[in-house]
Amino acid sequence: MTQFDAERTALLVIDMQPDFMPGGALPVQGAAGHNERLVGPVRDLMDAGLFPVQVATQDWHPAGHVSFASTHPGRDIFERIEVNGDDQTLWPDHCVQGTKAAELHPDLPLHRLAAVVRKGMDPQADSYSGFRNNWGPDGRRAPTGLAGYLHERGIDSVVCCGLARDVCVKWTAEDAVAAGLRSLLVWDLTWPVDAGNDQATRAELEAETVEIVTSDALPEL
Ligand code: VGL
Ligand code: ZN
C-alpha cells in the first residue's frame, strides 16, 4: 500500500439524499426504516475532520429525465433499455431538482462541505459517477469538473462513502482511480440499492484497484 497522506485526501460524500433513504423514491437496503442509521455514521465521519477537503455529490435530475421509467411509456421501473446506444436502467422518478427529497440530508453537517457537485442535470444523459455523465446523446461522457477541482486542491486520494454502494458510489470510486487518484471506499458507510449485487460490487471494485476499508480502520490509515 502506498503511503497514505491524510493532508492530501478528500472525503467524498455521495448522494446522501432522502430519495435514496427509507421512505424515499429509490431507497437503499440495509437501514430498515431508519434514515439515522445511514446519516449518523456519515455525520460522525464528517465531524471527525480527518480529511481537509470534504465534497458532496448530489443527484439532481430535471423532471422527465431520460433515466425515469415514467419518461418511457409502457416501460417499467428497473427495466433496462438502450438510450443513445448505451445501456440504461430505468428508475423511479427520484432526486427531482427543487424537491425536498433531492436535498442533501439536513442532519448532515453540510457547513463542512467545501463543494457540492451536482450531476444528472442533462435531461438526455444519466450520471452515476460524480466525475462525469455515463454517456450522452453526443457520445461524450461529459465531465463534471470534480477531477480538476480535486487536482487543483492538491488532492491525491479520496475516501468514498454514501449512496448507493452498487451504483453511484461504485462508479465514483472507480472513476477516481481513472482520474489518477488513490481511491478508498468505506464499505460500512455505503448501502446498496440491491444487496444481491454486493459480491459483484466488491469484486469489480477490487479489480479496478479501489481499496475497500471499514470505518473503524480509517483513523489509522
Ligand atoms: C443513483 C440510481 C439512479 C445513486 C442515482 O445515487 O446511486 N442510483 N440515480
Ligand atoms: Zn439518478
Image (cartoon, helix red, strand yellow):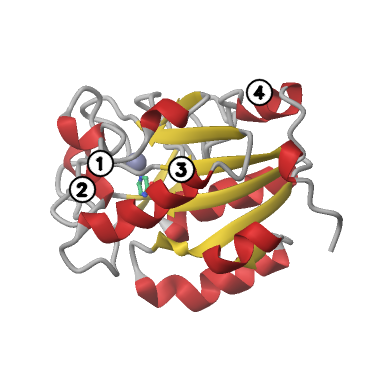
**119 shown above or below 3:** above
- The foreground one among 166 and 162 is 162
Dot 4, how many residues are within 10 Å of its Cα: few (below 14), some (14-19), or many (20+)?
A: few
Q: Which residue is mark 3?
A: 47
Q: SS class of the residue under badge 3? A: helix
Q: Earlier in the sequence, mark 4 or mark 3?
A: 3
Q: SS class of the residue under badge 1? A: loop
Q: Earlier in the sequence, mark 3 or mark 1?
A: 3
**166 shown above or below 124:** below
| Mark 4 or 3: the one toward you | 3
**81 shown above or below 214:** above
Q: Which residue is mark 1?
A: 68
Identity of the amino acid at label 1?
A: Phe
Identity of the amino acid at label 2?
A: Pro
Q: Which mark is residue 149?
A: 4
Q: Quadrant of residue 72?
A: top left
Image x and y of residue 105, in percent: 28, 39
Dot 1, how many residues are within 10 Å of its Cα: few (below 14), some (14-19), or many (20+)?
A: many
